Image (cartoon, rainbow, N blue to C red):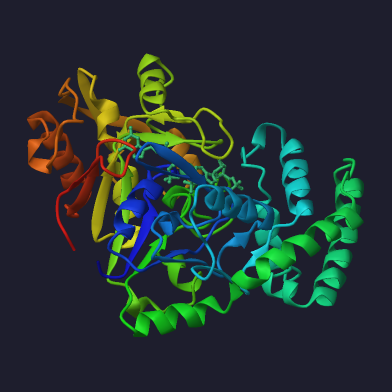
Amino acid sequence: MPNAIVVGTQWGDEGKAKVIDYLALNSDIIIRYQGGSNAGHTVIVDGKKFVFHMVPSGIMYPDKLCIVSNGVVFDAEQFLREVDELTQSGIKTENRLFISDLAHLVLPYHKALDSANESNMGNGKIGTTGRGIGPSYADKASRCGIRVGDLLDWDTFTKKFSGNFDNKQKIIENVWGAAFRLNKDEIIECYRNFRTRLLPYITDTAFLIFTEYKKGKRLLFEGAQGTFLDIDHGTYPFVTSSNTLSGSACTGSGLGPSAIDHVIGIVKMYTTRVGNGPFPTELNCETGEFLRKSGGEFGATTGRPRRCGWFDAVLVRKAVQINGLTRLALTKLDVLNDLDEIKICTHYQIDGKMTDQYPSSLSQLEKAVPVYETLKGWKCSTSGCKSYKELPSEALAYIERVKELCYSVPVLIVSTGPDRNETLTVETI
Ligand code: GDP
Ligand code: IMO
Ligand code: MG
């Protein structure tokens, strides 16, 4: 497969990891390039389930290189936990898993700040994952962050950490009036151990990626979160703290855009959202409950129930525009198997006016009333289908309509279940 970026087209949890795992078979290097352990990426192979927060989802194949590049905010504790789980399952990470020396660290005080910020926001709470993502990216932008490469020199790390720790302690206690329960010496001791374990993984990943690219190796960029959680283009302030769009794969890895052949948008066949913020097609009724149950829509990171609703074509059309999508990968079609009818939101009505263009203003989006088109359900299992053409005619009609509403971007695959095998290839690239 050519070099491709994979991004979520909605509010995350579209099934990116399942598709990454599938596409990784025909790739050589899988690169996580933004976000942090707020991501919860589920891969199921032969019934065995792995949830990755830090390690790229291509790790299940023993011959693939996996890279956590500079755009990620790196949670050392979580990373090592995943490495241990992989080791226990007989999956080796030595000499094929690398971390950028330029990636910023998420430290315990970032998590403390994340929860202090949230608990002081009252009704304006974002509903973060509590993984310290915002505070870590804030330090990066304020130029006081500590990078993975700082661990290479222990004195540099301890000096920077100690100064930052004291500052954060003051902020939490004086500004938020919260108790700062962290112990500096204990954290330093913990990181002394982490450092020993992390050293073999740390490298200049931008150089590694470029070198492999020049050798003709096939690169697969694994996006985290989704288009509408992007800090610029998403439903700000109800977003994450990184750019989640395809463009950030380049800055987040250090590889120029001329190397990219395809941008694959992962599209869940209905919509979900975790955390707060506007969601025009949300269903607070039995159908919403059905989607949650049938789709197992509970957060892979926090376990929170995901908010569920109909497919929103206005949203995904915007995702096509701002990511430059060249292919769609459709997921969770099977979740709709038992429904009599299925609705697609084709337009919004805002202040009495119909529009098929997603509004950039949050206040406009909050007023959006979805306008639906209704399609017939297929009312049968899709699990026996071994090829795309075998899908029931109503399912094919639904897919065709979704595609048409999304600028007719070609469909690459259709996923009909969580396992690697439950994937129908529509086209090979
Ligand atoms: P990601 O964050 O985009 O990688 O998605 P998550 O892993 O957070 O959530 C997707 C969930 O749906 C996981 O539990 C997957 O195992 C599951 N899943 C992925 N594709 C399919 C599918 O086609 N059908 C069903 N039923 N489940 C799927
Ligand atoms: P994956 O990669 C779904 C949401 C949180 C919250 C907002 C900000 O699994 O699709 P943060 O902790 O990032 O500061 O929280 O973003 N969020 C996600 N929602 N999937 C994710 O990742 C998410 N990562 C963050 O719920 O609303
Ligand atoms: Mg997820």
Q: Where is residue 259 in the image (x, y as percent from the top left)?
A: 34, 78
From the viewer's perspective, tell me whether residue 372 is left or right of residue 293. left
| Picture quadrant where residue 257 is located | bottom left
Residue 324 in sight from this viewpoint: yes
| Quadrant that contains the C terminus | bottom left
Give the total of numbered labels.
0
Left or right of 274? Residue 256 is left
Please, is residue 32 above or below residue 171 in the view?
below
Q: Relative to the observer, which residue lies in front, 151 or 344?
A: 151
Residue 1 horizontal/vertical position (percent): 24, 66
**Front-most of residues 44 and 333:** 44
Query: Residue 211 location, x and y as percent?
Result: 42, 84
> Could you tell me which residue is drawn at 24 percent across and 19 percent down?
338
Q: In this view, does 144 lie above or below 226?
A: below
**Residue furthest toward the top?**
286
Q: Regarding ligand 2, which quadrant of the image does it lie in?
A: top right
* In this rendering, position of residue 147 left or right of residue 94: right
Q: In the rendered image, is residue 351 in sight?
A: no
Q: Position of residue 147 (x, y in %)?
A: 69, 70
Q: In this view, does 4 lie to the left or right of 406?
A: right
Q: Please give the name of the residue rendered at 48% of the width and 36% of the height, measured from the top-left corner.
A: 278
Residue at 16% x, 46% y: name it: 404
Residue at (51% x, 69% y) in the render: 252
